[in-house]
Image (tube, rainbow, N blue to C red):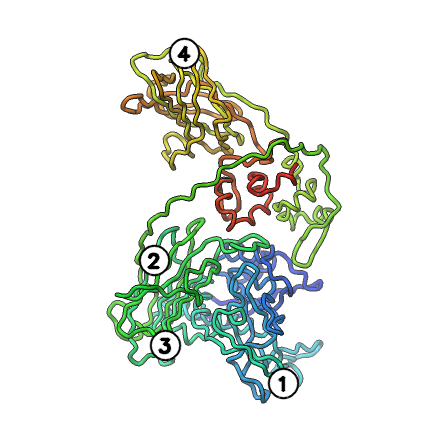
Amino acid sequence: MITVPETRKQLSNTQLSFFAADNGLRVPSASALFDPGYKAGARIHSASWGTPNQNAYTPFDLQIDEYAYENPDFLFIVAAGNGGRGNRASSVGSPALCKNGISVGASQNNTPHKKKEQLGPDYVMDFSSQGPTKDGRLKPDIIAPGQFILSAKAVQSAVGECDDTPDDGLQFKKGTSMAAPVVSATAALVRQYFEEGWHIAGKPEPSQGFAASASLVKAVLLNGAQELAGIEANDGQVTKSQAYDRSQGFGRVNLLQSLPLALKNSINGVFVNSQRIDNGDVDKYEVSVGMSGCSDPLSATLVWTDPPGSPSCNAGCVLNDLDLFVTKAGRNGRFFPNGLGSADTVNNVERVRIDDPEDGVTYTVHVRGSQLLESQDYSLVISGCFFLDGGSDNSGTSAPTATKTKEPTASPTVAPTIGFITNTPTPVEECVDGSGDITVSDMTIEDCAWLARNLGSFGFLCRFLDVALECPVTCDACRLLLQPADEANVSAVREAFSPLDGTVRWFGGTFDVQAKKQVTVRGFDIHIASEGQFSVQILTRPGKVSAQTGGWTEICQAQVSSSGRRELTAVPADTCEPVTIAVNESHTFYVTLSGGAAELILTDEEGSTGKTTVDSNDLSVGSGYAVTFFDQDSFEGFAFNGVIRYTVSSELAPQPGVCRDRSGTAVIDNVVGERSCAWLAANLGRFDYVCDMLVPSLFCPETCNICSRLV
């Protein structure tokens, strides 16, 4: 790891922090690997190792992305691998597949040892591993010289063996393992650039310095990367290459195309460090091109540290989708990123480069929160021949305040109806660990006995469905997988009979239910004063009566027959969607009645809304509002008079004999957050990987198509 001191005074004393991986390079967890250097002050980790022939996003790639997401100033830089000979696609291996790091390929190098047929540094080395990743992301991210790099020979039992003596202590080496440290050292210069305040005017302004996020450092490196011409094989044959292809990604590193430096270049720069954006928001940054004395392209690069994905995701590994595009004043059309003709929905790095911007024209760089699971921080770099705020010189600048707009919200997609799978056999009573294999990492296969011995370090494996099914005892999953059907419970909110003031005909009433255990509300008995046929509609929304959060969702719609005020009327259970309420969470319910001389009996709590009317070991019920039949005025302090039918469902396993998705919401994924099975069904194409996890697969067994495995 490279340690970059926080003060300018210490910059001349930059130090390296090393981590030794022994036992045949058996790599520990990401936190064990990164924490020692991070605690020592290192913010850049350079890794010249990897797993060949592993092109799918792995558990270790997930751990790296998670570490970066939790430590947004930490940047992981890794060699892409040396498996690209023969123009071999998808040869980049783990951990160079992570989203939030930088994967480095190798280019040729200028050297006195240059062969006659060698073309030079504008060509990718033939061995440099190529992308894309299995889910279609660009890899490698960037290229750096990886041939004829003078490196340590490391002569054992020798003193001064790394002195400048090529015959003894140093040797020329090649490989992406040589290229990755070049980019790592360059990244350290980028951090120094911002810490010393060079971004203000292309020269040091220490009082204006700041600590750059990893996403900003990455954006700078990729923003100025230069397109290479091709790939030269050992036999001298050349394969054409271009920016954003599978061999070079964004191109070869070149800081002079990203960072304004007085007397060194003529570009200007805009630098946005960790700007927060919400779903549907659009941030806009305007620059006015001035080409006098400057001929560089206009380049804008967007980078965000994405939440960790899921191992082996075949698509949708990027969870928060931002869009970058550029427009120019007075003209229609957009410039899209990464060489595409439309928005990029696959990568969490996007660059728009305009090689011939029009002099005197204002260009607007747009950053849009296209499809976000939650608010997201991003960094943006804009470089080129432009000026801001009416200026006309190369003044260097940090970012102006973004102009924020909100795009119209699209009509919500109607979730598919959740069906049921019935007549399935009940699970066996025995719960034992299997004798098969479980996948621990890219190259490690173990069994349940190994997992039991190493549960402290590898307990996270039990979150995956296949591991929990194979090792249910070790993973303590027996109670989940063999959970018996819940017995029905009832909560009598008020007595079946209660006097009613005949001058008021109640159309409906609200009340809230707070769960002390995880409960699933499955039906209601209501008290109707009148005899006849009536239409009942029951709606719900998260939160207490007083919270007024969210919109109403219909859960029951039924025609009922009432014999009058002395008997409860059951709302048929098959006309209601069950509602699961998590521990310590609340839902508000709204019961409405219509048709004929409808009169819903409620109990007057004397104006006290939110008063607890029932308090049991499972749940508590609070009073709410009564709504009149004619003008639907509401009155505070009325309690539901009837019965709530619910089951205690402290575990997520589907009921034996009825394998079905559950209603309500559960934590589908630590990144996706709390969602319903209907949401998952509607978005399964993008988030199918969550079905590999134990909790969402048990919560949504039908959507995840695993009923046969569970029963």
Front disc: 4 or 1? 4
Instruction: Please name the residue shown 57% across and 64% down the image.
Output: 96
Closer to the chain start, of discs 3 and 4, is 3
Q: Which mark is residue 565?
A: 4
* Residue corresponding to mark 3: 296
Closer to the chain start, of discs 4 and 1, is 1
Q: Amino acid at mark 4?
A: Arg
C-alpha gap between disc 3 and disc 4: 83 Å
C-alpha gap between disc 1 and disc 2: 54 Å
Q: What element does badge 1 sit on?
A: loop
Q: Amino acid at mark 1?
A: Thr
Q: What element does badge 4 sit on?
A: loop
* Image-quadrant location for residue 508: top left
Q: Amino acid at mark 2?
A: Asp
Q: Position of residue 416 (x, y in %)?
A: 48, 40
State the residue in front, 320 or 455: 320
Q: Is residue 227 left or right of residue 176?
A: left
* Residue corresponding to mark 2: 283
